[in-house]
Image (spheres, grey):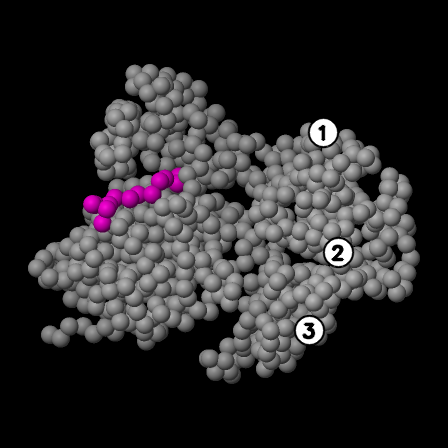
Amino acid sequence: MMKRGRGSRGRASAGRGNASDRGGIRKRGAPTRVDRDGDLAMGAGAGAIRGQKTRGGSDRHPPSGPRTQSIDRTIGAIQKALSTSTPQANIRQGGRSAGLEQVSVTGWKQSKAASNRDGGVESLVTFLEKKLTSSDSKPGARARISKSRVEGDALIASIRPEFLERMLQLSGFSFAGAPLTIEKHDQSTATMLNHAMPTQNGTTPSTADTKSKMTTILGRRYYQQSKLLDLSKLANDPDLVAMGIFNTSTTETKFFPALMKVWDLNFDNATARREAVESVSLADNQLANIAVVTALSQTFPDLKNLDLSNNNFKDSQALIGWRWKFRKLQFLDLTGNPFSADPTFKDTMLKWYPELRTLNNTQVRTEEEVAAQKKTPIPIQAPHFHDESQIAENFIRAFFTGYDSNRADLLSGFYDNKSTFSLNVNTSAPRALQTEPAAWDPYLKKSRNLLKISHLPPRMSRTYSGVEKIRELWTTLPQTRHPDIATHPEEWLIECYPIPGLPDITRQSSTGVGGFLIMVHGKFEESNAGKVESRSFDRTFILGPGGGMGGIRVINDVLCLRAFGGNEAWQLGPQPVTVPPAAPVAAPAVVPSAPAGYGLPAPGKTDVQVQQEQLVMQLSTNTLMTQQYSEMALSGNGWNLDAALKNFAELKASLLESLSYRSFANKLDRHRGRYLPMLFFQKLPFSPGHGCSSTIFYNLF
Amino acid sequence: MAPPGEDVYAKISTEAATDFVQSFYPALQSNRAVIASFYSTPPSTILFNGNSVADGNAVQDIFVNQMPPAHYEVQSVDCQIINKQYPTATTGRPLDPRKDISILVIVSGFVRYGESRDLPQRGFSETFVLVPNPSSEPKGKRKRDWLVQTQNFRLVV
């Protein structure tokens, strides 16, 4: 089949067809990255078999007894030993899981929950914990799964020994429509296999040998310049065939995860690993589902191009495990699969992959459409920060430095005996993709989530008033490290504005005093047992006049903790290139608010800047465009106010003329029900009978 | 008269917060015509993703006329009393002193814009200050004890 419009495949085939070319690619790609075992020599006879069109089970070698078993064992060793994200942790595994029993839970991948964003792991864990906790147990005796990880189709869960028996009895229970199989996870085997891995004492030859062979294979199939990892036609790979990988279903199942782990091992850090590959081909592998290759999504979560052509995927269910993976996928090739003929194929893939542009070599979304999708009905604006004499700013800077380094001083500096602190944990908040949430143990017993804590006594005991009580609590909370606000402003979203009606500690004002409401969103790092974990937080303060540093006091401090959710939500997106069509003529809902000091000279501001700001304000007043758009209109017209005004009038007239209700409706209709549902529901900026009404949200177009 | 005990304040404030959350978000979702009734007049500041909105009527107008269907899921709520002697100028009847307080409410949850369940869940954080309703007259169809004095909504995930 001809493939047009994509470089990856073409380059791959060219590379494969020519031995010397292949060598060149290897030189570029492999030695710097895949040399942990030193040996990059190609397996014997590598070139001889390649090129033969041998496909299908009939070509497979018959099982070859002892050799197969040894391959099985070494691959198993690699896979098991490396199954968590940090290989070092595994070597110390013996100590880490002492006192806990491990069980292997399978069957849940067939459940309805498997289509959840996390593959159903969270709901499975919740389900098991609930079933483990018997109805007659004391409130404190709730069973917990202290640790869990996914290995292929199995969830390996660690529980306290007293829960083992009950856990094993749960085998056969139905979870979201699928029966579970629960078995004791043979830790002695796992430990033994771990010892087969490289340790300080040396290296077990067979494992190292397998690893080295895999490294060679990966090096041969990796094209560094095009960032392509070509894993097509694996069954024909002479090195893999020689290793006996495809001789038994066990080795075949274990091979791919092991291969991925060997790949992971060759990178020192996650960033380098992620950036090394943009494209993967798994073409021509007779895959009926992704069960065997599912590890691909863990190793390459940011993949942009994925070639799955000429496999045997029949329907979306065959790919369901990747429903929430590959969130950056732009190119997907499923030609030569039965699923491609399914009437729902295109819609399903568009729904699954919001960045997808090319499906089966056909454009299915334009760049504009991808960009439009990311918009929210409420445009993201810069933080609203209305401070006075840098009171709030100074407090915020001091607060987060102090909270990380010296909480006691922080408390005596800004808190008094009426200050109140409480924290709440949102355990199910949406989180950044591809992150494992840190456990909530250190916080949960203090969490005052009113949706979960419904009785008055705990609601009262989880409110901390006065310096002493807050100090007592804060010393029990884990040490934190917030990013530096000055050098990492993108990690923070800080808003602040004055608020009236606060308590007056001098009791002089009957109408209350003014202060600041401060809302901070960001992240911090926490070190738990040597592992650094990130959490996101939302923290709201109310500051009033008081006896603390700078004449202020913290009246309220509420901390909400949630799984790490990144900072993309508040980044200002790329701005539209044209002046928006919908200039608000009457916008009663808007309080036009230029930031304090805007258009006025200030230290550090050049005269040109001041001049430009004043022009922006003029244009904004004349056209009622927002400040942001006024600025764009001006900069697009060389900061000439008349030109910008003329440009605005022309645009408005032409848009009013050409964009009748019908044409707008058609435009929207095209998107309806596909992937821009929110646009469809948008009030039209030029709807008939409403004149040119618009409000702050007009700039969606 | 002895001042109300901490338990009274805790009960009143936490119930005010949970009642508010349990009626406000469903209204954003499916009863947008009553949104204005949640707001005090004049409010102090209302912000959505950094956009200033003038008052409750403007919020209602935006939700009625411009917002796609939205599904809100509130996952965590906490509150604290800000001022136990909030200066409420009541009309018509004296205010129960136990309820003459202002309350800080923090909400964490997600919203899905559009009708399909497959659309992304956007995490949000929202801060409110609730103050007593000074009027004894029902505002809108039903009397609300607490009104929004200030509100700040931000998508955070």
Front-lying residue, A64 or A562 = A64
- Of callouts 1 and 2, the N-terminal one: 1
Q: Which residue is mark 1?
A: A4
The chain letter under disc 3 is A
Residue A678: percent from left, percent from top: 47, 40
Q: Which residues are magenta?
A: A379-391
Amino acid, disc 2? Lys
Residues behind callouts 1 and 2 on a single chain: yes
Amino acid, disc 3? Gln
Q: Is residue B37 above or below residue A333?
A: below
Nearer the observer: mark 2 or 3; the answer is 2
Front-lying residue, B9 or A241 = A241
The answer to if B58 sits in the magenta stretch is no
- Of callouts 1 and 3, the N-terminal one: 1
Residue shown at 82% from the left, 51% from the top: A240
Q: Which residue is mark 3?
A: A187
Q: Which residue is mark 2?
A: A211
Nearer the observer: mark 1 or 2; the answer is 2
Distance, label 1 to label 2, CA atoms, is: 36 Å
Task: Give the number of the disc on residue A282.
Answer: none
Q: Is residue B134 visible?
A: no
Would you say the magenta stretch is mainly helix, strand or loop?
A: loop
